[in-house]
Structures are given as C-alpha cells and as structure tokens.
Amino acid sequence: MILSDKDIREAILKGDISIEPFRKENLTPNGYDLTIKEIYINGEIKEEAVIQPMTWFAIATEEYIKLKNVTAQLWLRSSYARKGLLSSFGKVDAGFEGCLTISCFNTHQELKIKRGDTICQIVFEKMLSKPSKYYEGKYRGQRSVKLK
C-alpha cells in the first residue's frame, strides 16, 4: 500500500519515517521530492554541473532518510526523463537510514543540474508486518555519494 501525503505526515509523527531536512513544499500527493546535495562526475564532487550527452554521473540526496516499518521506491521526476535522463533505482529497505546515492546516465542533450534541484521522488510503502530483520548494510548512515 502506497502512503499518501497524509499517511506520510502520520508516519513521521509516529517515527516510522524521518526526512531531514523536511520541506513541506517537497511533499507530493503520494511521495516526497528529493533534492540534490552533491554531484559526482568525472571523479569529482561538485555542487553544480553541466552533464554532457552519453555521460554517467551520480548524485547524493540532501535528505537524510530513516525508515522503520516502511519501505520505499525511488522514481525519476518526469521532467528529467523528458530530457533524456536515465536512472537505476533500488528499493529502500526498512531500517535504512542515510542519504541516498543515485546513479544516472544522460542520453540526449546537455543537462544543467545543481544542489537543491529536485531530481526524484521517494514513494513510501506500508509493510503488512514488522520485518524480522532491519537493513544493516554498508550504506547505512552514508552522508555523501558512496559508490562502493
């Protein structure tokens, strides 16, 4: 079951979701728009970049997410998809906490991005029961782009 904006607010109050910093204008009817904190391109971390066609890069979200009895999916904002951006998203497990690293590939035209741009949406899903084990992997607690 996907959480609505009302459900997300309730899950935050209950402690099942934490989004820091939280911006009410980023809350959508069924998710939350995540913003760019930093861009990893050509071996460097930048706050803004012009991405050439046929170029891979990664971004870290500004938001530090904590999930308790909730899981989530990431979806590229359609405005970026229309510009030819492709991205690979995984499931965000219950128990995860940290900034998210997102791998991207620009296919079509020069693309300008910068810190603070909203690039993708996180969509939260209610779990039918508590998991027997929460996520404890190597990406837990990350605060910047983490590739390995």
Image: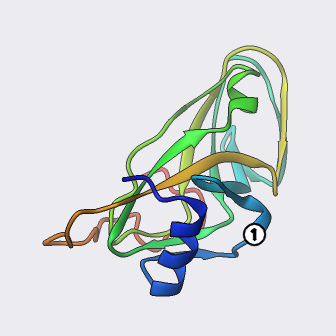
User: What residue sits 80% from the left and 50% below the top?
Assistant: 117
Q: Position of residue 104 (x, y in %)?
A: 60, 34
**Quarter location, residue 28:** bottom right
Residue closer to the observer: 94 or 11: 11
Residue closer to the observer: 101 or 7: 7
104 relative position to 118: left or right: left
Q: Position of residue 76 (x, y in %)?
A: 61, 37
**Quarter location, residue 134:** bottom left
Q: Is residue 1 above or below residue 5?
A: above
User: What residue sits 45% from the left and 84% below the top?
Assistant: 15
29 relative position to 125: left or right: right
Task: Check disc 1: other Cα within 10 Å, few if <14, some if 14-19, many if 20+.
Answer: few
Name the residue beneath numbered marker 1. Answer: 24
Q: Position of residue 59 (x, y in %)?
A: 65, 48
**Amino acid type, label 1:** Lys
134 relative position to 25: left or right: left
User: What residue sits 17% from the left and 72% below the top?
Assistant: 133
Q: What is the image's colouring?
A: rainbow
Q: Is residue 26 visible?
A: yes
Q: Is residue 103 above or below residue 73?
A: above
- Total numbered labels: 1
User: What residue sits 39% from the left and 68% below the top?
Assistant: 96
Residue closer to the observer: 123 or 144: 123
